[in-house]
Image (spheres, grey):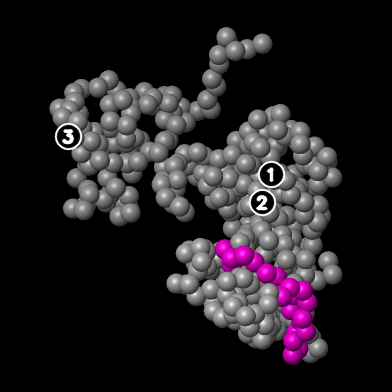
Amino acid sequence: MANNSTADFQPQITLLYCRQSLAAEAKPVQGNRSGDGFSARLVLLPCSSKVQLPHLMRLLEQGSDGLQIAACPEKACQHLVGSNRAEKRIARGRELLEQVGMGAERLGLDRGAGLSLDDLMEMAGQRAEAVRALGPNPMKGV
Amino acid sequence: MITAEWKPIEEMVGYLRGHKKVLVIGCATCVAECAAGGEREVETLAPLLAMAMQNDGNPIEVKSATLERQCEPEFLEAIAEAAAEADAIVSVACGIGMQLVAERYADTSLYPGVNTTSLSIREEPGLWTSRCAACGDCVLGFTFGLCPVARCAKSLQNGPCGGTRTNGMCEINEDTPCIWRLIVERATARGRLEDLTKVRPPKNWSNSPAGGPKRMLREDLRS
């Protein structure tokens, strides 16, 4: 695997989150946010099951350092099995990323309910930490 | 449907070393149904190959397309421009489609992205099981609609063998039901068990793939 790690590496994380996982009073947010040592692009989904492998792989091909999915708790999915489907796809995606030398940790899913913007940014930050060891995405700038 | 499975990406990387412009093509028919070579799989594989080759130190430009069918010449014209620009094509269609592409675009290197594996049905989501072996002499009329060629590990024409497990599964694979048990059960349910004792003419294996390349000719359809 390519190791382009640099001391000042600020991972760019794309965070795709389920609308239903937000706290009722939370306003859905999209767009770029800065975190502590990383940046995050927040993308709102109607359900985490809307994530498909082609979309995820294209995001990585286009240079995102890491992808984080925020899904509802298993028993709380409004579409019953949506978050489970997402979880299986993410597992498959992680296997494929390992095979191509990108590292499985560039992709992950965590569950949560009643999330705030701070919670989402914390998830993105955890993905950034996992990605930091892998270094910048070798596709960046290609 | 014809089923296929992705080759290991490492094997595809080996094929593509030395190439610069790669076209990944899928087929929206059988291999789409078995989640190996439809649009979704093509659009997953294309960026994966770009990433794999980048990490391999041999960066490539990857384009992608999914044809309605790769096994019909008319549909191949849709990629004429893209194929002319590419110096390699990765096809995730079945071996039939791949060969037609190789024939139409003979100046461009073609590599398989899948292994073609069987003629199967989707038994349940994520599970495909063989139903036909294209043996060329169908016996379903004798076996109550259950194929002992494709679905018996020994392709027995009279069964069950002595290896059926006590739970009715095959001795070779515990996840596969003994097809002769199912044939006997279906015959019994129809009150026709004795039909299985009738002497049948020998099966004509010369019409199977083992008999060499097939050539089917219909004079009434030729121009």
Dividing the image into 4 quarters, which one contains the N terminus of chain A?
bottom right
Q: Where is residue A79 drawn, in percent x and y?
A: 51, 63
Residue A76, visible in the rendered structure:
yes
Dividing the image into 4 quarters, which one contains the C terminus of chain A?
bottom right
| Badge 2 element | helix
| CA separation in Å, label 3 and label 1 | 47 Å
Q: Chain of mark 1?
A: B
In which image quadrant can residue A105 be found?
Answer: bottom right
Q: Chain of mark 3?
A: B
- Which residues lie in the magenta part? A29-49
Residue A15 appears left or right of A80: right
- Is residue B97 within the magenta segment? no
Residue type, label 3: Thr
Please tell me how crowded label 2 is: few (under 14), some (14-19), or many (20+) other residues with Cα within 10 Å: many
- Of the image marks 3 and 1, the number of the one nearer the N terminus: 1
* Disc 1: which residue: B66
